[in-house]
Structure formats: structure tokens, C-alpha cells
Amino acid sequence: MNQSNQKDKKDKPLKYYSAVTRAFREEMIRNENVVLIGEDVGESGGIFAQTKGLFSEFGPDRVRDTPIAEAGFTSLAVGAAMTGLRPIVEIGFEDFLTACMDPIVNQAAKLRYMLGGQVKVPVTMYTFGSGGLNAGPQHSQSLAAWFSHVPGLKVVMPSSAKDALGLLKSSIRDDNFVLCLMCKSLIGSREPVPQENTEFLIPLGKAEIKRSGEDVTIVAVGAMVRQALAASKSLSGEGIETEVVDPRTVSPLDIDTILESLSKTRRLIVVHEAMSPCGIGAEIIAQVVETDPQLLECAPLRLTPPFAPSPFAPCLEKIYLPDAEKIASSVRTMMS
Amino acid sequence: MNQSNQKDKKDKPLKYYSAVTRAFREEMIRNENVVLIGEDVGESGGIFAQTKGLFSEFGPDRVRDTPIAEAGFTSLAVGAAMTGLRPIVEIGFEDFLTACMDPIVNQAAKLRYMLGGQVKVPVTMYTFGSGGLNAGPQHSQSLAAWFSHVPGLKVVMPSSAKDALGLLKSSIRDDNFVLCLMCKSLIGSREPVPQENTEFLIPLGKAEIKRSGEDVTIVAVGAMVRQALAASKSLSGEGIETEVVDPRTVSPLDIDTILESLSKTRRLIVVHEAMSPCGIGAEIIAQVVETDPQLLECAPLRLTPPFAPSPFAPCLEKIYLPDAEKIASSVRTMMS
Amino acid sequence: MVEISKTKALEIHCKLWEIRLFELKASELYKDGTLPGFIHLSVGQEACAVGACLALNRDDFITSTHRGHGHCLAKGADAKAMMAELAGKETGYSKGRGGSMHIADVSVGVLGANGIVGQSAPLACGAAYTAQVKKTGQIALAFFGEGASGAGPVHEAMNIAALWKLPVIFFCECNRYAELSPFDVHVSVPNVSARAKGYGFEGVTIDGSDVMEVYSSVLKAASKVRQGMGPILIEAKTHRWHGHYEGDPMNYLDRSERDPDNRIDPIQRFESDFAETLELSPDDLLSSKKKALALVDQAVEFALSSENPSSALMMEDVLS
Amino acid sequence: MVEISKTKALEIHCKLWEIRLFELKASELYKDGTLPGFIHLSVGQEACAVGACLALNRDDFITSTHRGHGHCLAKGADAKAMMAELAGKETGYSKGRGGSMHIADVSVGVLGANGIVGQSAPLACGAAYTAQVKKTGQIALAFFGEGASGAGPVHEAMNIAALWKLPVIFFCECNRYAELSPFDVHVSVPNVSARAKGYGFEGVTIDGSDVMEVYSSVLKAASKVRQGMGPILIEAKTHRWHGHYEGDPMNYLDRSERDPDNRIDPIQRFESDFAETLELSPDDLLSSKKKALALVDQAVEFALSSENPSSALMMEDVLS
Ligand SMILES: Cc1ncc(C[n+]2csc(CCOP(=O)(O)OP(=O)(O)O)c2C)c(N)n1
Ligand SMILES: Cc1ncc(C[n+]2csc(CCOP(=O)(O)OP(=O)(O)O)c2C)c(N)n1
Ligand SMILES: [Mg+2]
Ligand SMILES: [Mg+2]
């Protein structure tokens, strides 16, 4: 069952970055093969304080600072995973995944297949991506689509503290290479989550309806989920009820939940911070029309930034990124 | 004008790999800033003889063997392009692009934008990809979609010797980073091409209708174009006329030519060797239904390998890859 | 000590102050919210930037890092267009699209600060390759940190430069930290310069707080690499006063490291150790510092009074 | 010379021949079209594989390259399942899905040949890290070529191994070529082993055609790295007899290099230099060679009589 819908009075608010720490801590206690490596994950506790306390609790063998060598230490993690550890690997910014594509795509994703099933590669890699912080062209990218294009990987995108907690814990327990794409703009956001040491897991591969509605289905990922929810709220005041679907895992994609929602709304908007061409939105639209070309009663829409690098200037990044207002106005246009 | 449709009696057959050599030679003669670097592009003439003779003609400054350092020499080429050279860079197999994603995506694609237009980055990178040679999981990939997802790059995919010649020459003259994805399985194929030293250029960003027909539009890229043409021929005998569209440049994509074709056929099949999720096929389908959800009279189809690494065994790779037979049978199903 | 003219000495002094004041101002403007995004300062490391760049010709190239304000200013970039860029204004070097990590002024050989650790090295090799092929006599200098020395592209660049005898200087600013972790998390030997031998070229370690030592070392190296003798690696030991980024709480520093009295100040050192020898009077020093201050004030004034980029700029220069 | 038992000596001799005969057979079967895809042979380099692997424990790990048949056989992989894999059969190590470049047998510590140059080094560091964390006493050995020594991931791996004092041996087979280009296109110093100093660990260059020298060097190194003294780099100078890949016309070789008489044969050397000292009679030699031949014949027989993979296998093991 989808546990993240359960709410409990004892739930306490937790910050997105602390959800990371807590997921790691609980899983490291649970399984001594879980180790954490990356740049500044150790004594310093991470650039966003996301690994604070883990070094002193688990020691230098299990929590280890790496030099700046994304390709090298990702490949190292793969080798460690093949031989019995379950490494968690931090890549500071999603943009730096460009430095370790080979170990992810040609090693981690293919080794089990190439080696006739002799090994598994239980690595959880997490990184902070997306925009909203005026971090400029090399520190704001959303690259989920690249990894969705590669068999042998799983890709998750937690859109809240609770999802971060539940998805990361499931990722660490998964026997595959799971890439967890976090949003920088959500780092300080908080949300009530189940108490510590409750077995709170969100299953990989299951979308969540974050809000129900009959008029338009908005599929949103990462930080765009909050924006979609905000838009939904204001639209509701205008008598338009939108359904917000958060895939949570973008590979493998839970298309069934999306199709089910569309069978009701028959209108589709996909919102993401990633570029449009060959993105998650294209994939969702393609699957929908392949399944049933009559399902949609009007043209689907991808709401994404224009096809340009992420600009630094706040005034430009504001125009560049989708937000609640733009989502609401797209919905209005679609409904008129 | 689309020059590749002109045919001339004086056209002589040329092999795909020799088209590469000829394009380089002509452009190196034309512009002394054009240089060629890569592993074994020099004295040895390349692993597919694709650079044969260039070293002895242009010397070690302009034709230079690199060590095995894809990230390093790609970034070097970018630095050289910023300062006045026009490097051609070989990456032996498309799969090794994983080793130089950062210089392509975070440097080449963004530098002009990030630097306020102060520089241009005229690099032509070419590589041999796709399957059909039983080269196994790490030597058979088609990764065009990754680069189509990135603004600031152009991506071309020559499906024949003639296209290789015309597209490479245009790429070398282009002031942007152009990635030219060649097909290993076409290396020995030949086709008549215009004589040497004719100004034969194929414009970037223009699709070509490789065959006209009214019933179904088949959009095929790379080696799949030949397969689509073969399928078309046999279908024609059955009274089904297919139109084969070769985008040739996949980023930016010439959607207009595809839409125009569809306005006639109203049926769409996209064939590629790349994986389906977030691929070129998804993008084409998404753009088509976004433009006009009524355009297609039946569900569009992506004909691609299953979502698994490329298997080595010939019997498996044969099932894995789309081919003329599978294309023909999909068309028949669609027409029935 | 290498001999220099009084004019050059004053230029050095003024540049040291221009960088220091530019960055302290940026720090202030960042704290009060005027400057957005992330900013990495090189306060304390000015001698590296100034010593290295003033030993190069105007048309020589440099490539820089995320911590690049000093390098850019020292090579001749204009403080006004830089500060405007930090503020995300249309008049900035990147038209507000790049920010602090992407300052470039190709007209004075600055090929760009860069947000990707390690890329400065192979990019510089590219500029050096152009110079080699076109026989222009130019050279390139790549700034990078000791943290970057662990990155694959830096190794690949050094190997290629050695094989091709490229006219390039690898200039490592060893400021004792990479992000939040100390030198010995990143480098397994006392000196990064030890790497050079493995490629067969010269590697030296120098005092990066001594601007004159930096200047003369780079001058000597530049003349060698310009003659086609292949690359040289210079490692300058220096000190980063501020955090990795502005706002960094620097919890990783111990008490003595936090004490401002324990800071090594390259400007003070220049003034106390060299002013006399170089015949700079207290008045000279004061007036060159004032000149620097004026430049920085003008830069701030220019930046703050500039317009935000128009929305059309968002889509410009994506392709040529 | 290190002392070894007659049993070990025979084991060495038999393994040398098993690899030689396995690869010559593969070459033959490739030429006649029985084996598909690309094949890279290590004929001439057998002493490296055998000397290195027989100095390791069965549960120690190796990582290998595109030229990995020798390594895999030497570490104890089964010739039958290997040849079946080369032939793309269901009984192959990868169920026919990997081919020559992806042979692995984790049960004897072979973590896989690998088609990506340079990846063997950091992957081996991963196995060494597991051993270190779990305190198993195992070590890992990474085979790579001198061409790979220019690749970033190899540098990153060496730096990490030095920093973390990982129990790993970097074993460079310097066979004078990388693909179609000679050593000096790839390495700017006479010996790749010179790199080790830059990381602060030991680097040695040995004669890779002398199986006993390889054996004793790796034995010594293994004992040091097993004690937690950090990594060691061993560079073995050796000779690749065949082309880069089967079918390579080898136009890049000059006449004398093409002359089979100029080949250095590590098996002949072992037989002529050591047989006596090790008390191996001509009969012993003959019978161990025969044993090797039988193994290879069985492997071919097994491979050719095995089934093609069923189509269901195409989608198996993509995820666990
Ligand atoms: C490829 C890559 N990995 C990680 C980072 C994040 N990062 C930015 S600066 C930095 C530390 C760099 O240290 P060093 O090279 O010593 O330079 P310094 O900051 O000390 O000037 C890191 C890890 C990055 N920008 N690029
Ligand atoms: C990252 C990467 N780049 C290029 C290649 C193509 N390639 C395969 S083997 C090889 C040469 C390797 O040379 P070396 O390391 O000396 O090993 P050897 O072949 O001599 O055993 C190259 C360039 C590759 N497989 N992977
Ligand atoms: Mg540093
Ligand atoms: Mg070699």
C-alpha cells in the first residue's frame, strides 16, 4: 500500500535536507553494509548539512569524504556494490553527473546484464538539482530524462521532505542503482513525517495523486509539484478542479496512474524544470497517445523552461522557470 | 535548396567511411583553421580507415593523435575553438560519449551563452554508434536523445554516404558544436555522391523525404532509414505506399516536414535504434499531438528495441533491433 | 628577486588592493541581499592572481575557476562589467546570464571563470594548442585548486600537454581547503607539484602569499613554455580567508584558524617586505590603494545603476 | 627468484599454454566466422596474466579490460563458459549477452573484463574498499594498459587509493601499443610506473615477459597491500603479438616488428630459463601442455555444442 497517504497525529515536521540525513541514518543502523561516500559528506556534514552527524555516529569507514573525482568514486561505488557493500553516493550538484556518466550508464546500469546476472549493483546516488536559486547555467540543470533513457537504472524525484524520506529509504534497500534527484529549492522546506524508526517506505515505481480533481490532470515532478498544488488551490476558487499527479519515480514510470487520472479529466499538462525536447513530458504524452489516441479531448501541453541554459539573473530565471501562476494560466487557457 | 535531391550523371559511388575522409579533406583545404584530433586519427588512418591520408597531407599540427582522454581532449577542442581553431573531434564509439559529457554539455553547449556571446564554439564531433555488429552492451548505443535534450548543441545523423558527406561539411562550417552520430553498420555501404570539389552541402536542420507515399509516414533515423526504405519497397508491392522521412538533423528537429507529411498520411511510425523512453520518437509524437491532437487517425507507434542493453549474441541482437521486416509488419497492422 | 620598474610595482600594489576591495565589497553586497546566487571569494589569495597574471602578456590566455574574480581582474578585466555581472545586470560580461562563476573577457585573454572543477586545465590546453598550431607565440595559464588536482580532466590535460609540448602553465592555488575539507582529504602527498615528474615536466612549489615570488616564478616559466619546452606546473601555497562560498559557517575550522590575527596577508607582506626595495613611498602606497578603491566604487555604482537584462536576452546567444 | 613448488611451477606452465591455445583457437574461430563481434587477444602477454593471478588468493579480486581472456583464465575462470560466451551461447558466463569483453566469474574473484578503457582501476578500488570496510583481508588487482594510463578515471582511482590506503594493486600491461598507436602517443615518460610517486606510493617496472618476475613482484606487492600499507603500481613491459582486434591489418607496424622471429615468447622463456631450476622435465612440460590443449578442446566442443540463448534471456537481468 501507498504508505505516504497515511497521516498520523504524531507526525512531526521535518526539513527536506534532514529527511536525507534521517533516511541514511536509519538505513545505516539497519544494515551495516550501507556506506556513504562523496565530497564533504564526512566530518563537515555536507554543504547543505544533509549528512550532519553521520560521520561521528558511523565513523570514517562507513562515512567517507572523497576527493573531487566523480567518475572515479562512482565507479568505486559500483565495484563496492558488486562485492557486498550498499553504497550511498553523493554528487553535490546534478550538473556534475556529466562527470560520471560512464560508471552510471556503462557500468552500473549494464553490469548485471552483461555479467549474466552474477552481480547486483545496489547503489543509491543522490544529488541536488533544478533551479530557483540563481545558481546559473552550470548549477541548475534537471537531467532525469537522460537516465530514464537508460535501461538498468531507476530514477526517483522526491518533491517533499516526506517523499525524500520514504523514497530514499526504499532506494537504499533496492538492489539496483537508483538515482535520486533532489531539488535545491526545496532544501529548507518542511513537512510532517512519520516518527523515527517507523518503517516508513514509499514504494519505487508508484505515482501519487497529490490532489484530486476532475477537470485537468497536471503531472508535475520535483519542485514543480508544490507549484502545481498552489495553482490548483487558486484554480479551485475559480471552479476549476485539477488533479495533481506526482510520478515520484520517473523510471520506471507509473503510466497507469496517469492514464487513470486522464480517463477522468481527459486533459493533460506536464510541468517540469527540465528541457522539453526528449524530456519526461514528451515520454508521458507519447505513452498516452500510443495507448489511446482518443483519450485526450484537447492538445496536451508541456510547461517547461524555454530551450536555453538556465540564466543567472533573478529576473530572467523567474521568467524561465514554470511556476504556480504559469500553471494556473495554462490550465485556464486549456479550459476555455 | 535541398541539394541532396539533385542527382547528377557524374555522381560516383563512395563508401560511408570515405565520405568522412573526403568531407574532412575538402574542409581542411578550404579553411586552415580546421584541425582533426582523436584517438588514432593520425598516421594509422583510423580504425575504420576513416581518416586515411589526412595525416600525411596535413601534417601533425592539424591531424593529431590524442591519448585516451575523451574528457580532456574534448575540453581541449572547446578551448581551441574559443581561440580561433575549428576542431573536428573523433570519439571512436558513441558509447564513449559518456566519458566527455561535461565538456560537451557544461562547456561547449553553454559557453557562448554564459560568456555573453563573446565566443563561438565551432567544434564538429563525430562518432560511430548504433548496433548491428554484435558489439555488445558497451559498444552499440544510440544516444542522440541526450544531446537533443541540451540547448546550445546541434545533432546530425547521416543515414548514407551522401548524407555523411553533405552533413559533415555543413557541420564543419557551422559555428556551433555539432555532434555527428554515424552508424557503424553503414560503414561499408556505398552511394553515388557529387564529384570532388563540388560545393556539396546539406543544410543543418532540414529533414529529407527519402520516399513519397500517402498511407503511412515512417520517420526513421540513422541506419533505420535503409530499413524503412526496404520495408517501403516491399509494402508498395502490396499496395501500401509509405512516406519515409529522415530528419537528418535531430536537434534542432525539422518538425514542419514531418507535420506536412502527416497532414497527408495521418499515420505515424517512428523507428530508431535508441531506447524508447525519452527518445527522439517520444519527442516527435509529443510535438505532433501538441500541434494538432486530431492530426493522427490512429495511435502512433514507436518501433525501437526493447528496454534492455544491446545483447551481444547475433540471434538476440537480431530480435532486439528494428528492421525492414518489423517495420513492414507494423505498417500492415496499422493499415488493417 | 626579479627586477621590476616602479610602475610595475605600483601596478601590482594597486591590483592587489583592487581585488581585495572588490571582493570585500562583493561580500558586503551579498550579505545584504544585493548580489544573488552563489559567490566564492579569493580574499587572502590575491598574490597568486596578481603575480601570475602580471607576468603574462596581454594576449596570453588564462582560464579560471569558480573562485575567479582575482584572476579576471588581474588579467585586465573591467571591474565595472564584473560587478554588474555579479549583480545580474545587462551590462555585465555575460549580460547577467552567467554570474560570478562565468566572468570572461576574451579581449584581455580571460577565457572564463568556470563552475566545473577541473575544466580550466584542458580548456587552457586548447588555447595553447591554438597558439601552437597558429604559431602566435601566445601561452595559456590554467588556474586550479588543489582539490581540482584529484579530478580526471586535470590529469588528462597534463598528460596531453606533456605529450604535445603545449605552451601552458598549470597554476595550482593550494589554499588548504577544497569546499569544506582540508588538503589531506584531496592530496596524498605534501605537494601537488610532485605530480609533474610523472609526466616528465617541471613542477615547483612556491609561496603563494609572496606576490614577487609568484611573479618571478611565472615569468620564468612563461619564458620556457613560450620557447616550446612544454608545460610547467607551479603550485602556490596560499590561504583562503573566507568560507568556500559566502555564507559558509566554516564549522570545519578550528579556533586558531578562525582567529583573524593568524591570517597571512599577502598585501601587508608586499607593503612591508618590498615597498622599500621597490622605492614605493607611503604616499605611493596610499594613492594606489585609493585608486583601487575608486575603481571598486565606480564598479559598484555602475552595477547598481545598470538595468536588469531584458527578457529577450534569455534566448540570445544559445547558438551562434 | 622466489621459491615455488613443482606443483605451482606446473600450474604456471599449464596456465600459460591454456591461455595461448585458448586465444589462438579463438583467433581461428573468429577468422572462419564462428565467433561474432570484436575480439582482442593477449597472445604474447600471457606471463602478465599468469604471474599476477597466481600470486593472488582465490578470493582476491581482479578487474580486467577489453583484452581480458588471459586474466580471466589465470584467475580461475572456466575455459568452457568463456568460449561459450565468445560464441554467444546460453552457457556462456554472460548467457551470450556480453561476449569477449565482459567475461566474469565472481566465484573466483573475476569482476569482469570491461569494454571501457580505464574503468578497471576504479572498479578494483571498489572491491578493495569493500575488503577494507569488512576487514576480510582480501585485495584487488586492476589490469590496465599503458593507453589507459592517460585516462582520467585511472588517475582518480590512484589518487583515491593512495588517500584511503586501499588494498589494491594497479597492474599496467605495457604492451607498446594502444589500439593503432605506439607508447609515445600515450605516455610522455619512459615508464608509467613514474606516476606512482606523484601519489606517494611505490611504483616499479618489471619484465612482463618473465612470468617468474611477474609472479614474485605481485607476491611481494600483495603482501604489502594486504597489510594496509596502501596501493602499489606495477608496470610490466610486454608484447602484443596480434593486432588490436582480430582482423586488424596492423599497417602501423614496421617490417621488423612484423617478423615472427622477432617476437618475444614468454612461454618459451619460461621453458628455457626455468624448467631446469624448477625441476620440470621435458615430459612434465609436454604433459602440462597437453592438459592445456585438452581444456581448450573441451571448451570449443562445449561452446559449439551449446544452444543459442533463448529470446527470453534478452530481457532478463536488466534489473534485479
Ligand atoms: C566537477 C565538480 N565537482 C564538484 C564541484 C563542487 N565544488 C565546487 S568548488 C569545489 C572545491 C574546489 O576545491 P579547490 O580545487 O581546492 O579550489 P578552491 O575552492 O579551494 O579554490 C567543489 C568540490 C564542482 N563545481 N565541479
Ligand atoms: C573510454 C574508451 N575510449 C576508447 C576506447 C577504444 N579503445 C579500446 S582499446 C583501446 C586501447 C587501449 O590501449 P591500452 O590501454 O594500452 O590496452 P591494450 O589494448 O594495449 O591492451 C582503445 C582506445 C574504449 N574502449 N574506451
Ligand atoms: Mg583549494
Ligand atoms: Mg597497450
Image (tube, coloured by chain):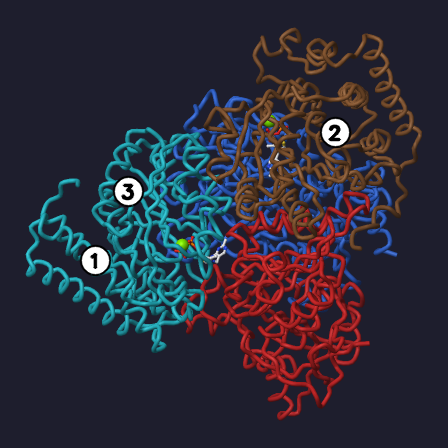
Chain colours: A blue, B red, C brown, D cyan
Subunit of label 1: D
Task: Decide: few, some or many residues near mark 1? Use Cα within 10 Å; few <14, some 14-19, many ≥20.
Answer: many
Q: Secondary structure at mark 3?
A: loop
Task: Decide: few, some or many residues near mark 2? Use Cα within 10 Å; few <14, some 14-19, many ≥20.
Answer: many
Tags 2 and 1 on a common chain: no
Q: Quadrant of the N terminus of chain B?
A: bottom right
In terms of image quadrants, where is residue B198? bottom right
Q: Is residue D141 left or right of residue A145?
A: left
Tags 2 and 3 on a common chain: no
The mark lying in front, picked from 1 and 3, is 1
Q: Is residue D121 left or right of residue C114?
A: left
The numbered mark at residue C69 is 2
Q: Secondary structure at mark 1?
A: helix
Q: Which residue is mark 3?
A: D60
What is the CA distance from the residue labelled 1 to the residue labelled 3?
25 Å
Q: Is residue C225 visible?
A: yes
The numbered mark at residue D267 is 1
Q: Name the kind of residue labelled 3 in the image.
A: Asp
In the depicted view, which residue is nearer to us: A85 or B121?
B121
